[in-house]
Structures are given as structure tokens and as C-alpha cells.
Amino acid sequence: MAPSLAPTEGKTNSTPKAPDSQDPGIVKVRQPRPLPITVVDKKGLFCIGLDERDFQVLEDKIPQQIETFSDDVGQSLPSTVAVLMDTSSSTLGKLKFEQESAMNFIQLVVRPRKE
């Protein structure tokens, strides 16, 4: 899973902060920043079903509000994957390993279509 803690695309709203105590004429503006993350388990598999309540964002040990949250795993665009394998005589002893590795890769990347 690759949740993204980020402002909505195209959103440019800024939140003014209180004036600086040293110079009351200065107003600090806080820009939302994207914080892309990936969560995996001990086996390296994506953790699914997480939402913003499962995360805490700290800046200088101060909790920050998560303004937007999206789980990009379910929103991936369709793609085409081709796996090319060297089957020449120089790899004869390694062909089974290559085939298993290719299948593991495909099973990791490909998800069933949601119809």
C-alpha cells in the first residue's frame, strides 16, 4: 500500500499563522506538503486497509493535522508489463530460478480487475 498524506491535487490554499512575536509585520504562511509513504509488513507485503487514523505526523515532536489522505493502491492506472527472459544455453542451469522469479514478480505487481 502506498498511502499519500498530501493536499488534494491542484489545491493551493495556505493557512496563515499567527504573526511573528519578534516582528508583528511578518505573517508566516504554512504550505501543505505531500508526504508519500509505503507501509509493508515483516514479509515485505503491502499493508492494506489503513486510513489517516492509523498515522501520526510530527514536526519537531509536535503533532500535525493530516489535511488530506489518499490510499493510492486502489487507484492505480492500468499498465502493461512484459517479462523478458534469457533462455540461451548460458542460463540453462538457472532457467527454473528465472521462471520462479518472474512469476513472483508478476504475482506481486498484478492485481485482479475490479469489474
Image (cartoon, rainbow, N blue to C red):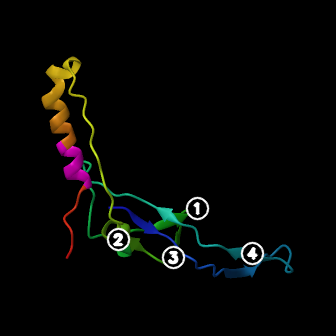
Find residue 96 and report its horizontal and vertical position in percent: 12, 30
Q: What is the residue that sits farthest to the top in this orientation?
A: 90
For label 1, the crowd category at 10 Å Cα-Cα, with few meaning under 14, some 14 to 19 and many 20 or more, is few
Of badges 4 and 1, the one in the foreground is: 4
The secondary structure making up most of the magenta span is: helix
Find residue 62 and report its horizontal and vertical position in percent: 55, 68
Q: Which badge, 3 or 1, comes first in the chain's sequence? A: 1
In the picture of the structure, the residue carrying the numbered disc 3 is 65
> Could you say which quadrant of the image residue 73 lies in?
bottom left
For label 3, the crowd category at 10 Å Cα-Cα, with few meaning under 14, some 14 to 19 and many 20 or more, is few
Query: Looking at the picture, which amino acid does disc 2 mark?
Result: Gln
Query: Looking at the picture, which amino acid does disc 4 mark?
Result: Lys
Query: Looking at the picture, which amino acid does disc 3 mark?
Result: Gln
**Residues rendered magenta in the picture:** 103-109
Distance of label 3 from label 1 (alpha carbons): 14 Å
Question: Which disc, if any, is residue 28?
Answer: 4
Where, quadrant-wise, is the N terminus in this rendering?
Answer: bottom left
In the picture of the structure, the residue carrying the numbered disc 2 is 75
Image-based side of 62 in relation to 54, left or right: right
Distance of label 4 from label 1 (alpha carbons): 17 Å
Q: Which badge, 4 or 2, comes first in the chain's sequence? A: 4
